[in-house]
Image (tube, helix red, strand yellow):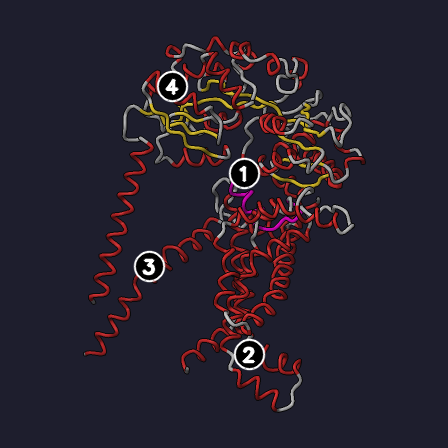
Amino acid sequence: MKKLFSMIIGLFVICGLLAFGAHRLQASTGSNGSKVLNLYTWGDYIDPSLLTKFQKRTGYHVNVETFDSNEAMFTKIKQGGTSYDLTVPSDYMIEKMKEAKLLLPLDKAKLTGMKNYDPRFLNLDFDRDNKYSVPYFWGTLGIIYNDKFVKPGSIQHWNDLWEKQYKNKIMLIDSARDVMGFSLASMGKSMNTTDPATLLAAENKLNRLAPNVKAVVADEIKMYMSQNEAAVAVDWSGEASEMLDNNSHLHYVVPSEGSNLWFDNLVIPKTAKHFKAIYAFLNFMSDPKNAAQNAEYIGYATPNMKAKALLPKAIRNDRQFYPDNKTIEHLQIYKNLSPEKVGLYNDRYLEFKMHH
Amino acid sequence: MQRKQRLSRNTAYFVPYSLWILLFVIAPVLLLIYQSFFNIDGQFTFGNYQTYFSSSTYLMMTVNSVWYAFLITLATLLISYPTAYLLNETKHPQLWLLLIIMPTWINLLLKAYAFIGIFSQAGIANQFLSFIGIGPKQLLFTNFSFVFVAAYIQIPFMVLPIYNSISELKPSYVNASRDLGATNWQTFSRVIFPLTMPGVKAGIQAVFIPSLSLFMLTRLIGGNKVITLGTAIEEHFLTTMNWGMGSTIGVVLIVAMIIIMWLTGGSGKRHARKGLTK
């Protein structure tokens, strides 16, 4: 009996310790403090020196927590129990969060920097009138190639990937929407199609690409491309910019016939608590100088046109990351699809992966 | 009276364990089974199972998973049995055992990344191949490299149980067999191997079952050229958010594991009884 008793006491002690630990953890994320801002964002998606600058100027301490997929972020915010003040979903996820009533509308009167943004990137389908979101970064989906193995200029379009000379040389990003998407774009179809026959055709076309596909991987593409492991890759512009920084032989192309245009926007989830800090931060980040510094650090394209004007000429005029208007016209933003349709994309994609 | 007290004390000892089992083993499995009967709209359905067993994609994936798990287990067994046997003959088996177990202290991801470095175009393996005149080969993203790395990771879990049953083997049996005129091979195949079978079976269980649902390595080392059920589960839970289908695959895996346990089981009981009479 004594042993049992001590075991029960042990259990209580453990529970107590856990409760204490949870309390400490909560205190450190500052959900209890008042001079804080809880930012929930993608990994390495803000220049840390800006956070210090923000704290110095306004006195708000920014706690950064990170996620690695829109879906993971969505689940966490939906389940509640968190106190995130700002998060950075992509276009289609903003639509989805809006539908799920997880977002709070912006108080436009408190925003001072909206005029700095390029009107092309405001008032878009996923958030009319920018009721809920402030643009943060934008980018594209495209092809990266290494000029050691591929003649510069020989890859301009999606269809070039199907050529026999690239046998076992192409790496694809492991993302159903993007891989199915470029196959659709290569056939001149909408990247948001929900027609089963069209999706099947896209899968069949991908199956013909299979001999050229060396691997379907995720973040590792950056490492592989930098180390000359593969000649060609399909990935997002932000990832590409990091690769290009590490290896001068790499180039990035956005096929002019069409590709994905994506946005990551700042939104206020319904879990938000520190509204003064939120608006201070939104205004701080739309300040051209800060946005330019952030864009230079992250390497993605800024939607803040005044900030873009402040960027070094080499970045500002880089057609790879700031494509011309004609290409932009052909780019498509992903729409939020119903779960069944997302399932359709994933089933087709899974079959392609099985096939290759 | 005294006996009654002891009985209640014994049941009391059982409480924390059964609570643990109930909360962290039985409840999750029941939840998984429950979840597998709902479609994406949250309606009750048997559709997930219908989809699973009528879709050639999932069936192919199942065959693939079992096939690769089999290859990994076979490779591990072929390496581990001689290792465990020789280990028993060495002077300091505990030290060697420690060295074999050591890699399990390192995170799986780190090991996978290390292999990416070794197998890459400019990696050590290819440098060696160039040096001996074969020339660089594509090593990453091949079925070979996937099985190789998976086997490397699983080896300690196979060596341990086999070593234990070999060290339990009484040398007098081996001596007796030799005295009675058996050749080395006969001694091994008729005496040593059957007597160490429980260890082999335990090793197979410890390796085959986790290998069925490996998914991190399929991407990192296999470049998604090897697709197992683990890949599908990850996709259903993270991208499609079709938890019902993901759970269904999970249930199928659990059933597969039960079958493996049942096939390799039985000897476990004998093993336990032997332990009791000792």
Residue A2, compared with residue A141, is above or below; it is: below
Q: Which residue lies under the disc numbered 1?
A: B239
Which mark sits nearer the N-terminus, 1 or 3?
Answer: 3
Q: Observer-nearest residue: A90 or A18?
A: A18
Q: Observer-nearest residue: A197 or B189?
A: B189
Which chain hosts label 2? B
Secondary structure under the numbered disc 3 in the rendered image:
helix
Cα separation, mark 3 vs mark 4, equals: 49 Å
Cα separation, mark 1 vs mark 3, equals: 34 Å
Disc 4 marks a residue whose amino acid type is Phe
Q: Which residue lies under the disc numbered 2?
A: B195
Residue A4, compared with residue B166, is above or below; it is: above
Cα separation, mark 2 vs mark 4, equals: 70 Å
- Mark 2 neighbour class, 10 Å CA radius: few under 14, some 14 to 19, many 20 or more: some
Which quadrant would the N terminus of chain A be assigned to in this image?
A: bottom left
Disc 1 marks a residue whose amino acid type is Thr
Determine contact: label 1, label 4, CB under 8 Å: no
Which chain hosts label 1? B
Q: Which residue lies under the disc numbered 3?
A: B19
